[in-house]
Image (cartoon, rainbow, N blue to C red):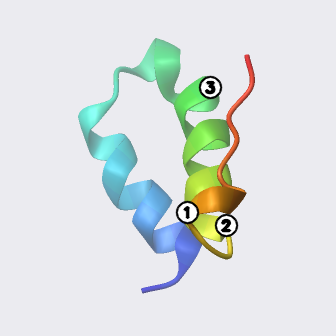
Amino acid sequence: MLGVHQIRSSLRFVSWKDRKAVAKDLKAVYTALNETGIIITR
């Protein structure tokens, strides 16, 4: 599954007010090359 489809599927469980922030974090997760490439900063 492509990253955009995974992100859209995951966003079904997120409230509308939090979608933008969650989508940004999910993009980093789904586009990382491996598990050490995931660094989420806030």
Which part of the image, by quadrant, shows the N terminus?
A: bottom left
| Closer to the camera in the image, 19 or 39 | 39
Which tag is nearer the camera, tag 1 or tag 2? Answer: 1
Residues tagged 1 and 2 counted as in contact (Cβ below 8 A)? yes
Mark carried by residue 35: 1
Task: From the image, tell me which residue sits under label 3.
Answer: 21
The disc, 3 or 1, on the residue closer to the chain's N-terminal end is 3
Q: Residue 40: where, in percent of width, then height?
A: 68, 34
- As drawn, the residue found furthest toward the left would be 13
Q: Amino acid at mark 3?
A: Ala
| Closer to the camera in the image, 20 or 42 | 42
Which tag is nearer the camera, tag 3 or tag 2? Answer: 2
Q: Tag 3: Cα neighbours inside 10 Å, few (<14), some, or many (≥20)?
A: few
SS at mark 1 in the image: helix
Q: Residue at x 57, y 55 (%)?
A: 29
Task: Please state if 15 lies on the left or on the right of 37 as rendered.
Answer: left
Q: Residue 36: where, in percent of width, then height?
A: 64, 59
Say above or below: 1 vs 40: below
| Closer to the camera in the image, 35 or 10 | 35
Q: Amino acid at mark 1?
A: Glu
Mark carried by residue 32: 2
Q: Residue 23: where, in percent of width, then height?
A: 58, 41
- As drawn, the residue found furthest toward the front would be 36
